[in-house]
Image (cartoon, rainbow, N blue to C red):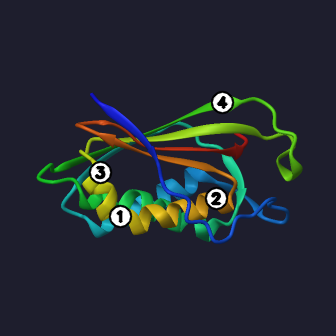
Amino acid sequence: MPVTDSAVPDTNQETRKDLPGLAIISLNEVFKEVLKKLQCLYSGITVVSRSENLPMIRGNREKMVVLFENLLLPVFRSRGNSPTLFFYVNCDVVKTELHDGPENGFKKYEVRIHTNITTDENWKSLHAPQLANCQQILLYHKANFVVNSINHTGCLYSITWPGKL
């Protein structure tokens, strides 16, 4: 299963250096809400989803909804002839303590979204506007974003950001 890592180009216009005053939001809730919405739009597709407990982050909930829509919609559109779409989202701690600004006491988490579609450089080019929008939102939330090419199944997106469980 070849996987090629490539970072999305930084086209950031507005990067927040700190996030005071933003709410603590549940990525679990946002992921489930967006997945449910897309399942309704694509009612002819069987979606199998499994998600580990995702972190709570300091951020803007509306931007997180847009983020997950931009992450998941290209997958729904790219399923080919497959009647079943698989999502597996896992999460690991990559740094145990952060001491910068409002994230004091937070840990750094890597969230990986796995799926069963095939992607390549053409897929990335086709979905470049959505991926660039994801990059903007994630930079605003002090997160790192990587899009992988996958040949049958595997980790499509990797996002690293401060949060807490």
**Which element is circle 1 on?**
helix
Q: Position of residue 76 (x, y in %)?
A: 28, 58
Q: Is residue 61 visible?
A: yes
Q: Position of residue 159 (x, y in %)?
A: 55, 45
Residue indicated by mark 1: 38
Amino acid type of disc 1? Leu
Tell which of 54 and 16 is nearer to you.
16
Residue indicated by mark 3: 121
Q: In the drawing, does residue 126 fall left or right of residue 22? A: left
Q: Nearer the viewer, mark 4 or mark 1?
A: 4
Residue indicated by mark 2: 139
Q: Where is residue 25 in the image (x, y as percent from the top left)?
A: 68, 57
Residue indicated by mark 4: 94
Q: Which of marks 3 and 2 is nearer the N terminus?
A: 3
**Which element is circle 3 on?**
helix
Mark 4 Cα within 10 Å, few/some/many (few <14, many 20+)? few
Mark 3 Cα within 10 Å, few/some/many (few <14, many 20+)? few
Q: Earlier in the sequence, mark 1 or mark 3?
A: 1
Label of residue 120 in the image: none
Which quadrant of the rendered structure holds the C terminus? top right
Q: Where is residue 141 in the image (x, y as percent from the top left)?
A: 68, 58
Q: Earlier in the sequence, mark 1 or mark 2?
A: 1
